[in-house]
Image: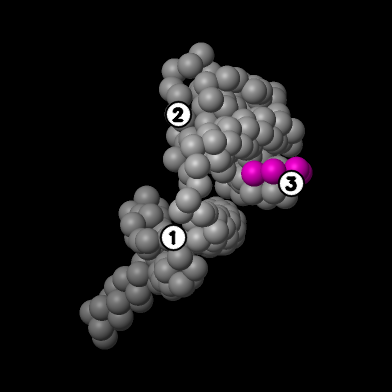
Amino acid sequence: MIDSFRVLLCGVLIGCVFASGCEDPEKKARYVKAPLETGDLTSRIALEHAVSEARTRLLSVHDSQLRDSLSRDIGQAHSRADAAIREAEQQRAAADERQEKQQRASAIALKLERERKLAKSPAANKEAVISRRERHRAAVATHREGMRAAVATLEVGVRNSLLGDGTKVLMLRNPTQQTAGFELRCHTVNDVMQKTFSVVIPPGGEQHVGFLQGWCGNFKQGERCEAYVDGERIWQYKVPF
């Protein structure tokens, strides 16, 4: 009788130990967070799947404090990844719109060039050829002056990155009716690193520059960008403190 009671008591104690969730917090945290740390979080479907898997694993955590802490970590990881996805979506939409405008402008230019060739008289004399060349040079010069003026008139600023880490995204807006095409040379603090971008902003258009366009991360305080047209610096912008 006494032996049976001892066996029963030992079983109860062992059950209590397992029920209390004697677990290694560090090992448990790695297990719960694994889907968010090793998974592909670049799409909403993949992100939601990873978060769902992490929360499912969270149910296996017995310690309430550890469970609450891990729940907060999962929520923060979800917010950061979601912000990065929204940033990428906005940049892709802006890039698609710019590409569409450029394609329309190229199609119009090609049509005008074909019409010009059809309208050209095969019997044009030397004087007419010289005149056309002069008009072409004048048109090119006028275009370049207009381009330079458009670049000089650009509205330049920054906005906070959606990543929420204090970095900035450069914003360039063209308020004129002239396309602004130029080289954008960006420098880190003390010129440790620099990169040159070829930028074309249509009339009334806007372009953002950050890590999605090839800069080393987003912009930080003290970094600067310069606009050049035909080797001439038009303006310089320094990310404010």
Q: Quadrant of the C terminus?
A: top right
Is residue 75 something one can see in this rendering? no
Label 1 element class: loop
Per the picture, the main secondary structure of the magenta-coloured stretch is loop
Near-viewer residue (238 or 231) = 231
Q: Is residue 205 above or below residue 52?
A: above
What whole-number distance in Å separates the C-alpha atoms at marks 2 and 3?
28 Å
What whole-number distance in Å separates the C-alpha atoms at marks 3 and 1?
37 Å
Near-viewer residue (127 or 68) = 127
Which circle's residue, 2 or 3, is located before the other in the chain?
A: 3
Q: In the image, what residue occupies the spot 45% across and 29% down?
A: 195
Q: In the image, what residue occupies the spot 48% across and 16% down?
A: 191
Task: Read off the magenta span.
Answer: 175-179
Q: Residues within 10 Å of mark 3 (few under 14, many from 20)?
A: few
Q: Residues within 10 Å of mark 1 (few under 14, many from 20)?
A: few
Residue hosting label 2: 195
> Which image quadrant is residue 75 in?
bottom right
Q: In the image, what residue occupies the spot 50% across and 42% down?
A: 125
Residue hosting label 3: 177
Residue hosting label 1: 42
Are the two marked residues, 2 and 1, in contact with CB atoms closer than 8 angstroms? Answer: no
